Amino acid sequence: MTRRRWLAVAALSGLLLAAGMQQRFDSTVDYFGERSAFVSLPSGKTLRVLSFGYRNLAADLLFIWSIQFYSAYNIRNRFDFIERVYDTITDITPEYKEPYIIGSLIMAHEANDLPMALRLLEKGSRLNPDEWIFDHDAGFYCYKYLKDYAKAEEYYNRAAAKPGAPVFIKRMKAHLVYLRDDPEMATRMWLDILHHAEDTLTRDSAFNHLYQIKAEADLPLLQQKIAEYRRQYRRPPAVLADLARAGLLREIPRDFAGDEYIYDGASGTVTAQRIFRWQKR
């Protein structure tokens, strides 16, 4: 047997032996069974040094591993290490956006730890002062899940001030002002958006918000005056114009589109022609 054949046989025998040992080991281990794990990572500063100039590659490999690790739902305690994992990745390459975004997503939706998610996004914003996405995501979490409209507005203000921030962030700012019950400020903001709108979506969003804000002020006023008219005349007004003729209103308000509100003389109720799209609570 030649030397080359001998080496080939030896290599094949080694592979077969390794495969047999692996199969035997696999038969004793339940890889998908519920278990605990322990994760120990050097600091990001240490890994930057150990990467020997390939810090982007080191961060990529660790980030890919983290996605696989946090997809292993059979690991009971995987969230015990999540903040350390993503802090380490973002310490290696602070300008790497995806770990902040994906890490905060896992923290918020999988680990159910919104304060942790906000800490990671705030780190991204602090280390990448020209990026708007981190403040935007933090604002969304505060708005959608915490219902902390003031905090959400603060994040959106920061996002809107960043270079290249998209126009929808300005819309979110105005919407949050509306949600925290400041109709005068919200009206001014939406009017500014309406007057400077460059696309149909922005224009329609501004118009609809302005319509609702005005209706929410007009309808209670009209119902109050209808009740006063009923007390005076023992009946509801036949038409809304009766309120002006009775001196209860100087003029009858119209909706933001300039149309009359819908009045039911039999029941004495008044409604808007458009259905409201947003709920404050």
Image (tube, rainbow, N blue to C red):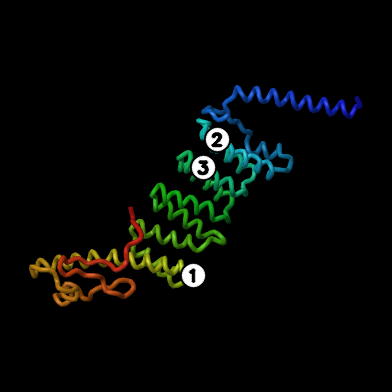
Give the residue at x 71% y 26%: 19
Q: Quadrant of residue 177?
A: bottom left
Q: Position of residue 169 (x, y in %)?
A: 48, 60
Circle 3 packing at 10 Å, graded few (<14), some (14-19), many (20+), is some
The Cα atoms of the two marked residues, 3 and 1, are separated by 34 Å
Amino acid type for the residue under numbered disc 1: Asp
Give the residue at x 49% y 71%: 198
**Residue on which disc 2 sits:** 72
Give the residue at x 53% y 51%: 134
Q: Position of residue 118 (x, y in %)?
A: 49, 45
**Residue on which disc 3 sits:** 106
Mark 1 or mark 3, which is nearer the start of the sequence? 3
Mark 2 or mark 3, which is nearer the start of the sequence? 2
Q: Quadrant of residue 185?
A: bottom left
Circle 3/circle 1 CB separation < 8 Å: no
Q: Secondary structure at mark 2?
A: loop
**Residue on which disc 1 sits:** 199
Amino acid type for the residue under numbered disc 2: Ala
Amino acid type for the residue under numbered disc 3: Ile
Give the residue at x 58% y 29%: 31
Q: Secondary structure at mark 1?
A: loop
Which one is in front, 53 or 208? 208
